[in-house]
Amino acid sequence: MLLQITAIGKEHFFMLEVCFVLYDASVLAGDNKASITVANNMSKYYHVSIVSLCGDHLNNSYKLNSGIKINFAKLPVLRLRQQIPYAVKFLTSYFKKRHIDVAIIEGYTPAGPSAFVRLFCRTKLVFCDHSSCMGKYNDNSARMIRKIATLLCHRTIALTEVSRNDYMKYFHLSEKKCRCIYNWIDAEEFEKGKNCSYDSDSHTIVSLGRFGPEKGYDLMVKVAEKFFSERNDDWTWEVYGDGETFDEISAEVDRLGLNDKLKLMGRTDDVESVYRKAALLVLPSYREGMPLVLLEGKCYKLPLVSFDINSGPKEIITDEKNGYLVPPYDVDIMAKRIAELADSKELRTSMSEQAHCDIDRFSQQAILQQWLDLIEELVRK
């Protein structure tokens, strides 16, 4: 058992009510996946429930532990400030009825309409930002939401140390009020990765993730065009995922005649097979919080190539040791780095061997303990 119960009685502790507030549980996204994984593991220690502000069903890719109840607020499709009274009314009633001790608001989008519940009930609020603090910092609306969330919530959780430092600097938070808790590598995936063998003979590059404007798939196409234009061999690049920009990216791949090399594979539920057959993994994002795909690639001992964006990759990749950090959005250098790996089996093997050098920082056991400690700290107050 992980938890060391100190200040409160054991019987009372296991009666605690913890609620996770998501924006839309019907959407397949990394932040939802991470949140539901934490919720499932917390349910071993507390009574756990989930509120989805929008949507009316749980995405089929997510599985909830028995005993976790999910409720849908079904907020009307309005501007954010118009959603606030609907969200506050629903959450205030729900938190009071269920006697919620701690509510974890997952992301700055749900934080906008949810944080004001602080004014109407005694539930302790935790704002967990799944993107970087500086993501959309110049967007007045995004900056204001983060300002309100950090002001009203009892704790702010950043997914990286860089983002935590930015929160403390730009939103004037104390070290106690702002914490960094990483996403973890799923325990089952962790064990599979530890026991897997890297295929140094593979000639397959992979990228995985939702197709959205922030994911940089437009940049990926430019990188692929440069990479494949300079070689005539059997290397291919497989991209897994779907989303709102899929058709746009597919049309660009077709226009450039890259279909046989840059293959848009659609969504997959078998990521293990994808990682096991890969030679390296590429993340072309404009911005991230703590990218799960890099953690998963690291778990499966893949050399990693990513833009060195503000938050996330630099805490997973050690440049030139287990992968490459590329100056943000420089498609020429990214194509060059990928080519260096493609041209050297020895380099790929060496980076694969270094993939697990610091992986215990991202273990489920270590990070779950940090969440349990946070809950205990809040209920002791």
Image: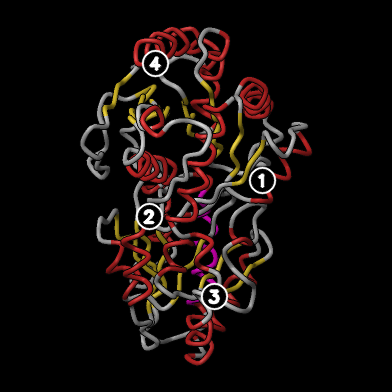
Mark sitting on residue 250: 2
Colour scheme in the image?
Answer: secondary structure
Residue 247 rendering spot, x and y as whole percentages: 36, 47
Q: Which residue is labeled 3 in the image? A: 357
Which residue occupies 54% across, 38% down? 374
Residue 306 rendering spot, x and y as whole percentages: 57, 64
**Front label number (2 vs 4):** 4
Give the CA distance from mark 3 to mark 2.
37 Å
Q: Of label 4 and label 3, which has the lower sequence position?
A: 4
Q: Secondary structure at mark 1?
A: helix
Q: How many marks?
A: 4
Quarter where residue 166 is shown: top right
Quarter where residue 165 is shown: top right
Task: Specify few, some or many for label 1: CA neighbours under 10 Å numbering under 14, 14-19, or 20 or more.
Answer: many
**Front label number (2 vs 1):** 1
Q: Which amino acid type is marked by label 1?
A: Ser
Give the CA distance from mark 3 to mark 1.
23 Å
| Bounds of the magenta segment | 215-228
Give the CA distance from mark 4 to mark 1.
32 Å
Q: Which residue is labeled 1 in the image? A: 163
Q: Which residue is labeled 4 in the image? A: 99
Q: Is residue 29 left or right of residue 287?
A: left
**Front label number (3 vs 2):** 3
Q: Secondary structure at mark 4?
A: loop
Task: Specify few, some or many for label 3: CA neighbours under 10 Å numbering under 14, 14-19, or 20 or more.
Answer: few
On whether residue 283 falls in the magenta region, the answer is: no
- Which corner quadrant holds the C terminus? top right
